[in-house]
Amino acid sequence: MSTGSASLPGGPTGVSLRAVGDSALIVEFGDTLEPALVARVQALDRAISLACDTGALPGIVERVPTFRSLAIVLDPLITTARQVADGVRPLIGDTDRDTGPTATRQWCLPVRYGDEHGPDLGSLALTLGMDEQEVVTRHGACPVSVFMLGFLPGFAFMGTTDPLLQQPRRSEPRLRVPAGSVALAMQLTAVYPWDSPGGWHLIGHCPVPLFDADADSPVLLGPGDRVSFRAVDDQEHQQLCADRAAGNLQVERFLDRS
């Protein structure tokens, strides 16, 4: 089995295609984090999904969208990276003209901001020259898109946040960030699905599980989903946490069906 990486010719201007071993193709649109690149990645992902449904691209096992690239995992017993590249190239040019949905679902997630739930809210507000309530208001007033999943199962990188809230990561990462922590870093926001190390600014806690191994669909959020955040008080937060602990928290209630 080949494990190297090889460029394939014929990609549109600014787009590169690389075969990775004999079981993957990577389509790269750039090397920066920009909403326009994310949109092109997701547009190509949709186009390939449709092509797979019609049988036009056989042998594709999985697609993994990121901020700037799309990894296409293939079955080498059915197809090759070169054959997949030949089928994908005509789709790449349509990504700038894609008029498909930019969001598959709309979510509204509850957040208990500040105090022990958001230990960095005060210091972040001070750095930004705001009071804590303005940070909370700005975070909740700016719906974000899921750009990609990574780092941990169910960890959704979401953006773009309010420009006035954008700050680098903490200079000293924490060894443990509690599951459910709502965090900010650069132009991104996220909810930690697991206890883990992390260097983002923690501003609140969301009791909705972003990963549930026992669920039919273990990962709650997917690329292209739109997410807004709603501030809740202690009483509602405690009730939501209790519902989750009792197995009574139905995640569908946080879908915005309006």
Image (cartoon, rainbow, N blue to C red):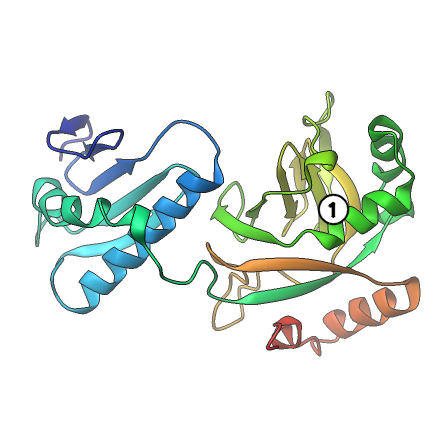
Q: Position of residue 43 (x, y in %)?
A: 34, 52
Name the residue rendered at 64%, 49% in the picture.
194
Residue shown at the point (21%, 40%) measured from the top left: 25
- Say which of 189 and 74 sits in front: 189
Residue at image position (73%, 54%) is 141
Residue at 56%, 59% in the rendered image? 226
- Residue 84 vs 47, above or below: the answer is above
Tell me the residue that label 1 is attached to: 178
Image quarter where the C terminus lies is: bottom right
Residue 81 x %, y %: 13, 41
> What x and y, as percent, mark residue 216?
48, 73
Q: In the image shown, does 2 or 40 lie closer to the viewer?
A: 40
Task: Say how many tags the image has.
Answer: 1
x then y, percent, for residue 254 = 66, 71
Residue 115 shown left or right of residue 51 in the figure: right
Instruction: Give the answer, above or below, for where 89 lies relative to 248.
Output: above
Give neighbour class at mark 1: few <14, some 14-19, many 20+ (Cα, 10 Å). Answer: some
> What amino acid type is highlighted by mark number 1?
Pro
Quadrant position of residue 162: top right
